[in-house]
Amino acid sequence: MNIPPLQIGDLTLKVPIIQGGMGIGVSLSTLAAAVANEGALGVISGVQIGFREEDFKSNSKEANIRALRKEIRRAKELSPKGVIGLNLMVAMNNYEDMVKTAVEEKIDIIISGAGLPTVLPKLVKGSTTKIAPIVSSAKAARVILKLWGEKHNYIPDLIVLEGPKAGGHLGFKRDELEVIEKYDLKNILKEVLDTVSEYESKHNCKIPVVAAGGVYSGKDIAELLSIGASGVQMGTRFIGTYECDAHENYKKAFIESKKEDIEIIQSPVGMPGRAIKNSFIKSVSEERPKIDKCYNCLRKCDPKTTIYCISNALMEAVKGNIENGLIFTGSNGYKITKLTTVKELINDLIKEVMEYEQVN
């Protein structure tokens, strides 16, 4: 069997894999370009992307915009023929400015979650940039399809369905994450595909749906494709690559982790998240740390009441200070046992898909 390409409008991915956007600084231009060079979609995370800029603490808004331009341009230089995407959280205070900057830099596609991207079509109007909402249910998919259609006369170029086994912030309540049978990715995928099918028939178009959350192996990919997904999104798996933009200590934390080290935590954003247990998680559960600097990054965050500064926690981790930082992970992060190259990883995944298809 030949693995079908993923078609997103006039963009063609010969490998139907999207490398999930991971912030802060885990997936930047190096990783995104390496993935794009293999025919998949490489994705830069825009969350606090300017954290390495000299004026970040004093002028984070401008530092983030400046760094975003740098990373997009660098990714395109490293992968001139590849497809480069950007992941942006709706909950970011500078969301609209970051979208406009990315459009100016001619980013190929913007993938947006952590809230419904209700105004995204308006922000990319007149450009060639594709847009994709992240949803966690058929209900959410229906809401965004209806809203974009009625308010903007726009059909999503792609829909990313993120299930409960994903890393980072999750679009599920804590008790829902414990009922895995009901909220299993495959079950939700079938529901979303049914919802999307109604709109495809109504508008005589194709809306590709990509499945995400705990996707780790070629077998996972093959099973999701067989159900009807047009592709998959994988984030955590790419942390185990040499090209991943995070510090080596960050990658080492995954290699040394065990299944029991991964747990659901409560994020300062008010959403549950999945992370690797470490000294930081233990300490913040016992005592609220003092917040010396607010980066004004998230709309719902109040430095007076938040349990800790999530920006600082994520920045410390990606810089290598892993015991004093937050390490988000998908449910299968503990399965990473060694580093590999992006090329080897994608080739292995394709081989696994082919082998699975041959015996099923």
Image (tube, rainbow, N blue to C red):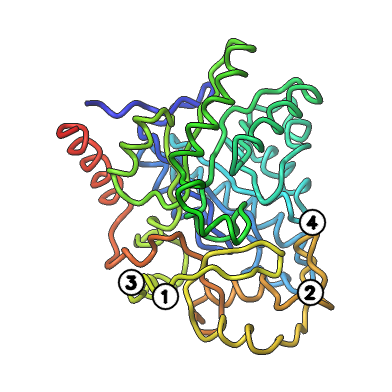
Residue picked out by circle 3: 255
Q: Residue at x 69, y 56 (%)?
A: 66
Residue picked out by circle 2: 294
Q: Residue furthest left?
A: 359
Q: Residue at x 47, y 73 (%)?
A: 276
- Distance from the alpha carbon under mark 3 to that under mark 2: 32 Å
Q: Nearer the viewer, mark 1 or mark 4?
A: 1
Q: Quadrant of residue 59?
A: bottom right
Q: Nearer the viewer, residue 181 or 38?
A: 181
Q: Nearer the viewer, mark 3 or mark 1?
A: 1
Relative image position of residue 31 (x, y in whole percent): 44, 54
Specify whether 36 is left or right of 270: left
Q: Are marks 4 and 2 in contact (CB under 8 Å)?
A: no
Image disc number at residue 93:
4
Which numbered disc flags the more N-terminal residue, 3 or 1?
3
Which numbered disc flags the more N-terminal residue, 3 or 4?
4
Which amino acid does the dot numbered 2 rest on?
Cys
Which amino acid does the dot numbered 3 rest on?
Ile
Residue picked out by circle 1: 261
Which numbered disc flags the more N-terminal residue, 2 or 1?
1
